[in-house]
Structures are given as structure tokens and as C-alpha cells.
Amino acid sequence: MSFRSVLAAGVLVACTLAQAGHDDVKVDPALKRNPGKVTSLDAHGGAFSFRAKPLRAAGYAPNELRGWRLTVLAGKRFGAAFDIESNTESEITVASSGGPLDGLAAGDLFIAEGK
């Protein structure tokens, strides 16, 4: 194979790669993520809640996490996911449909992901 053939093949590959792309594809922004740590647990009447501390801020904005998904990242409930019903500055209430918070403990880490 001659040098010219190799050069021509290289130019052809470079032109093919340069033309590839999807400029018209709309990409949704990444999910917002808010890591936190459980500080204590409470359970009242069908709703399950726990006190928490965000790892990146002093506190949560009220109902900032409503409708978000919470996934436990450390502890006995590792991998468990819950839908957040509401939150205050330091308390998160999850839907009871996700099951009880049994096994969740102070010090467990979680991540809340939402819109």
C-alpha cells in the first residue's frame, strides 16, 4: 500500500467523522441531584418521614423536593427508592406506597433526583 493510498484513506475517514453529528437533537437537561444524610426518623399516620441534612446546603427549601425520587445510597436500605411527597427545611416525607422506612437509620446517605 502506497503512502498516497494511506493518506487518501485517512482523509476519507476524517471527512466522514467530521460530517457525523446530530445538531437537531434536543437533549433534556440533566436531572438535578441533591445528596443528603438522614439525621433521625419519625413515622406519623400512613406517611413516612425522616429528618435530614443536605450535604451541599444549610437546609432544603420547603417543598423543593416534592415529586422527586429518593434513593438510599448507604445503610441497610441501600438501593431502596421512594417518591418524595413533601419536605421542610429539615424533614422529608415519602409516599407510604414505597414501603416502610424500616432499616433506615441516622447517618445513612441518600440522593434525591428530580426535575
Image (cartoon, rainbow, N blue to C red):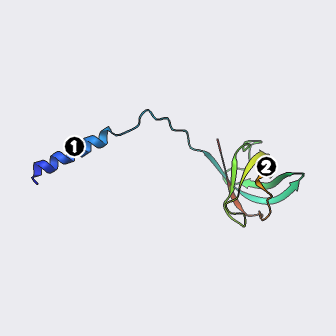
The reply to whether the C-beta atoms of the residues labelled 2 and 1 are less than 8 Å apart is no
| Residue in view at x 87 percent, y 51 percent | 46
What amino acid is at disc 1? Leu
Q: Which residue lies most toward the right here?
A: 45
Q: Residue furthest top?
A: 24
Residue 91 can be seen in this image? no
Which residue sits at x=22%, y=43%? 12
Q: Residue at x 69, y 60 (%)?
A: 109
Secondary element at image label 2 = loop
Which disc, if any, is residue 95? Answer: 2
As drawn, 103 above or below 52: below
Q: Earlier in the sequence, mark 2 or mark 1?
A: 1
Residue in view at x 72 percent, y 44 percent: 65
Q: Can residue 68 be seen at all in this image of the molecule? A: yes
| Residue indicated by mark 1 | 12
Q: Horizontal and vertical percent for residue 41? A: 82, 59
Horizontally, residue 29 falls left or right of residue 98, namely left
